[in-house]
Image (cartoon, helix red, strand yellow):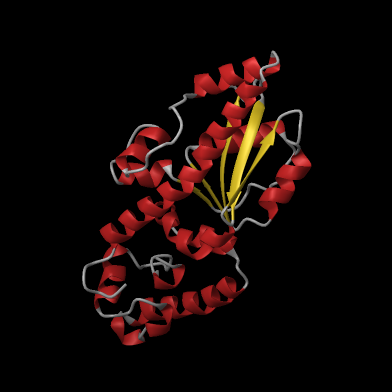
Amino acid sequence: MRVEASFIPVEGVGEQTERSLWEQGITHWDEFEPDAVGATTADRIEAFIEDARKRLAERDSHYFGRQFPSQAQWRLYETFEESAAFFDIETTGLDQRHDAVTTVSVRQGGETTTFVRDRDLTAQRLRKTFTDADLLVSFNGKRFDVPFLEQSFDLDGVLDRPHLDLMYPCRRLDLTGGLKQIEKDVGIQRDRPDLSGKDAVRLWNDYQRGDEGALETLVGYNREDVDHLQTVADRVVTRLHERTVPDGCGL
């Protein structure tokens, strides 16, 4: 679902009113007719559409991130997917004050880049990578990845942008557990043996002791997380769309 199909950001428009608009065949801002709702609501919708059109032309994802309710942030995905940054990190532990980020993988435009601590993982490279992203996509990134990155690197608000943390829409679909369990639940099979966060710590420690193969395994594990993250996002957003949109409305 693209943002142009949504009316829920408008004050006074809830899920029932939006569904009613869709059932009347109003599935795009361009199709809105004022007599489809009451006069006050119509004025608000028209004001929103006028503003939103300008913001969309400017690719102002921050605006839509502010306007859409938290439970509807998944609706930004289709519109901003091409400029989204799918990301995942590995660390030496769970305490952002004392532990370190070891690898960061970011997928943009169909390409995945991995940065490694003490090699090319720097604030400058991360800043350059995330600056052009209109949308962040992660799994549990709001509580874990973003705080870790902000604590470890001076990113000056670079990560302050719309963020689709898939853990929350997955829960709405009764998809629980970690990312790997959810991958299985939505039909994704991994090529590599399953590794845990503890394995990631062990691999980094082995690399620090001179095992280059351990780093290769860690990087591959981190990259696969990000590559599958995009597939999970595609499937979860599709399921939410099917659950939200009534049958036969043409959306």
Expressed as whole percent of the image width and height from the top left, the position of residue 227 reads 51, 45
Note whether residue 93 is visible: no
Q: Is residue 108 above or below residue 182?
A: below
| Label total for image | 0
Q: Is residue 232 left or right of residue 129?
A: left
Q: Is residue 82 above or below residue 170?
A: below
Q: Quadrant of residue 29?
A: bottom left
Q: Quarter of the image containing the C terminus?
A: bottom left
Expressed as whole percent of the image width and height from the top left, the position of residue 22 reads 29, 74
Q: Residue furthest top?
A: 209
Q: Residue at x 60, y 34 (%)?
A: 147
Q: Give the camera-side residue of 77 and 7.
A: 77
Q: Quarter of the image containing the N terminus?
A: bottom left
Q: Quadrant of residue 38?
A: bottom left
Expressed as whole percent of the image width and height from the top left, the position of residue 178 reads 40, 32
Q: Is residue 71 left or right of residue 55?
A: left
Q: Residue at x 31, y 54 (%)?
A: 239
Note whether residue 44 is visible: yes
Q: Residue at x 43, y 55 (%)?
A: 74
Q: Give the camera-side residue of 192 and 40.
A: 192
Q: Residue at x 24, y 75 (%)?
A: 23
Q: Is residue 210 above or below residue 239?
A: above
Q: Give the camera-side residue of 15 and 59.
A: 59
Q: Quadrant of residue 84?
A: bottom right
